[in-house]
């Protein structure tokens, strides 16, 4: 079992495990993954003044953007429509772009493509406890297992079995253990709740986990209709 850890990527940490690959090849795959993470961090990290998003936000004129940025903007427009306007990267109507609720899922899409290209069948990726991707299964088991923790107390809430699927976790309580404090438009709900979404695609999972914290009952129904293959639920926290 190969295990890799990348720290301070998009303000978080990424852990990757995969099996069934010779050691030399495994290190080569990890090198490709970290190189891709660094490249994407240079595009979407708004805390880096030299990142593409920071340069774009600071520019007073139209500038040429990378293919990744063009794709990201198009995807975000689609999610804005699909989530009934709840997923908005413009920080509540301001002009600045903020990909905090998007970049991890997008990065996991890219990592999944790298692993598939390297013919890795069994892998598990945990991106800061907020987006988790499972490919295949853990050795000597029929699935991968993720331990869901209460972000307030770090107590174990449940064990979640994942089989070639993704899980996104979002909560509206103060940030702990890498969980996201609802970044959409800066809105914080009064009660402490956690949103969980299972989906085949990590980006769908991340976006939906965020917006389900904000959605009304009617909006939840409409959003679920637009993303039929995703499963979502809300956990009320003490």
Image (cartoon, grey):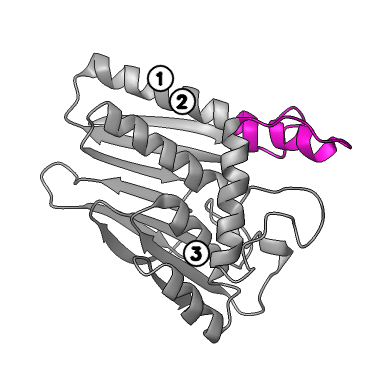
Q: Which residues are magenta?
A: 41-66
Residue 236, percent from left and from top: 49, 79
> Looking at the image, is 154 positioned above or below residue 41?
below
- Pointer 2 residue: 34
Q: Is residue 187 left or right of residue 128?
A: right
User: Does the magenta segment cover residue 49?
Assistant: yes
Q: Farthest residue to the left: give it.
A: 140
Q: Nearer the viewer, residue 224 or 170?
A: 224
Residue 32, percent from left and from top: 41, 22
User: Does the magenta segment cover residue 197?
Assistant: no
Q: Is residue 170 visible?
A: no
**Secondary structure of residue under mark 2:** helix
- Pointer 3 residue: 209
Which quadrant would residue 230 be assigned to in this image?
A: bottom left
- Tell me the residue at 85%/35% (across/down): 59
How far apart are labels 3 and 1 at the CA level? 30 Å
How far apart are labels 2 and 1 at the CA level? 5 Å
């Amino acid at each position: 079992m190969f295990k890799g850890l990348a720290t301070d990527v998009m303000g978080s940490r990424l852990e990757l495990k995969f099996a069934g690959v010779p050691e030399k090849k495994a290190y080569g795959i990890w090198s490709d993954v970290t190189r891709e993470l660094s490249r994407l961090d240079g595009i979407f990290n708004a805390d880096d003044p030299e990142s593409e998003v920071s340069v774009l936000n600071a520019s007073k004129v139209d500038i040429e953007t990378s293919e990744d940025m063009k794709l990201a903007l198009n995807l975000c427009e689609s999610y804005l429509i699909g989530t009934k306007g709840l997923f908005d990267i413009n920080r509540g109507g301001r002009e600045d772009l903020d990909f905090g609720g998007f970049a991890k899922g997008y990065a996991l899409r890219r990592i999944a493509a790298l692993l598939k290209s390297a013919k890795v069948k069994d892998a598990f990726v945990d991106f800061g406890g907020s987006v988790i991707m499972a490919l295949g299964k853990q050795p000597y088991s029929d699935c991968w297992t993720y331990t869901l923790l209460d972000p307030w107390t770090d107590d174990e809430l449940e064990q979640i079995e994942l089989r070639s699927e993704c899980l996104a976790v979002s909560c509206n309580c103060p940030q702990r253990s890498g969980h996201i404090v609802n970044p959409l438009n800066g809105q914080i709900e009064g009660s402490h709740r956690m949103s969980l979404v299972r989906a085949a695609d990590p980006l769908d999972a991340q976006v939906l986990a965020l917006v389900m914290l904000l959605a009304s009952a009617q909006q939840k129904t409409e959003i679920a209709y637009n993303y039929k293959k995703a499963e979502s639920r809300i956990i009320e926290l003490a």
